[in-house]
């Protein structure tokens, strides 16, 4: 199972859209892995975690053929994760010669309403092309999706909607990813559901970086706690890869320093374009 990080920033990006603080200027000066766009991950070539505002940019920057994406797992409706108007471009006169790749999105009720709004105001009320389907996902209710076994789990993020993290298992290889953003330390019901599961790769919300102090996102210290608890529960082992992502520039260090610090704890700091392969059997 190939996992490619297309974007690794929190909502504001890093450098942040309008910001000229010293951390943003430093990111602009260093460039490379210090340039972070909004969080998104591509699994193999056909499964996207979230469909944020930088999806199109990601396809250009990383040579991603978005027509090959069959499944999109939406964590929640925050606009750094979901830009529903893009779905209008999946059909009609905007997308030609790719009918054989229908795309199904899974998400919560708020995401469904956002699609409805886009269709109403930006597509003249005409429904989305038949190549795009949306299905409601519920925490704890697993489903099969085009070669993957998916289990949505409750996140601790925004009580105004049902935010979710996802377990994604590649059916062919049995390799599993736990994709855990946006979320604070997991709710107890999620820990309960994780019992008896095993992950080859764990991707964690690290929005609060070295600062912490916010309930709906994790810090690096929280990531260490997630790692500790998953290992103790047998949900991870010495071969499990742990990665931190979704960084806010107000709380984190530049990539090089952060990477060095995290390496001491056996955690990798994601960067835009980073590709990881869950260890082969
Ligand atoms: Zn976010
Ligand atoms: Zn800044
Ligand atoms: Zn969010």
Image (tube, grey):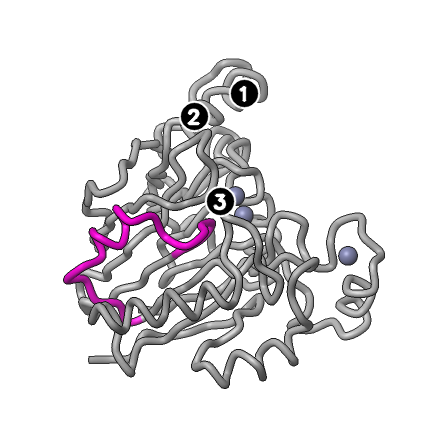
Badge number at residue 128? 2
Q: CA distance from mark 3 to mark 1?
A: 18 Å
Which residue is at 46% across, 43% downward?
157
Q: Residue furthest left?
A: 196
In the image, 11: left or right of 189? right
Circle 1 residue: 123
Instruction: Mark 3: give few (<14), some (14-19) or many (20+) Cα within 10 Å.
Output: many
Q: Provide residue 80's location: percent of width, then percent of height.
A: 57, 44
Q: Quadrant of residue 225?
A: bottom left
Mark 1 sits near ligand 3, with its Cβ under 8 Å away: no
For the magenta stretch, what is the residue range?
A: 180-200
Q: Quadrant of residue 99?
A: top left
Badge number at residue 6? none
Query: Is residue 188 rendered magenta in the image?
Result: yes
Which quarter of the rendering shows the C terminus? bottom left
Q: What SS does tag 2 mark?
A: loop
Q: Residue furthest front?
A: 213
Q: Provide residue 26's location: percent of width, then percent of height.
A: 80, 69
């Amino acid at each position: 199972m190939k996992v490619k990080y297309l974007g690794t920033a929190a909502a504001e990006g890093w450098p942040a859209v309008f910001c000229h603080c010293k951390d943003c200027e430093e990111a602009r000066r260093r460039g490379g892995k210090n340039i972070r766009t909004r969080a998104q991950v591509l699994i193999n070539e056909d499964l996207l975690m979230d469909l944020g505002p930088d999806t199109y940019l990601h396809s250009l920057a990383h040579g991603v053929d978005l027509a090959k994406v069959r499944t999109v797992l939406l964590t929640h409706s925050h606009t750094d994760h979901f830009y529903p108007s893009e779905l209008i471009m999946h059909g009609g006169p905007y997308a030609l010669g790719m009918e054989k790749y229908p795309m199904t999105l899974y998400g919560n009720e708020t995401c469904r309403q956002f699609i409805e709004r886009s269709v109403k105001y930006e597509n003249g009320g005409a429904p989305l092309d038949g190549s795009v389907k949306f299905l409601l996902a519920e925490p704890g209710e697993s489903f099969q999706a085009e070669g993957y076994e998916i289990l949505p789990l409750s996140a601790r993020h925004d009580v105004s909607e049902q935010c979710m993290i996802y377990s994604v298992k590649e059916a062919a290889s049995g390799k599993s990813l736990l994709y855990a953003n946006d979320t604070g330390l997991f709710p107890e019901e999620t820990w309960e559901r994780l019992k008896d599961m095993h992950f080859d790769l764990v991707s964690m919300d690290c929005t609060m970086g070295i600062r912490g102090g916010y309930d709906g996102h994790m810090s690096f210290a929280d990531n260490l706690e997630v790692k500790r608890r998953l290992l103790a529960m047998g949900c991870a082992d010495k071969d499990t890869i742990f990665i931190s992502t979704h960084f806010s520039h107000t709380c984190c260090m530049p990539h090089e320093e952060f990477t060095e610090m995290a390496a001491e704890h056996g955690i990798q700091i994601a960067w835009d374009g980073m590709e990881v392969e869950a260890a082969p059997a």
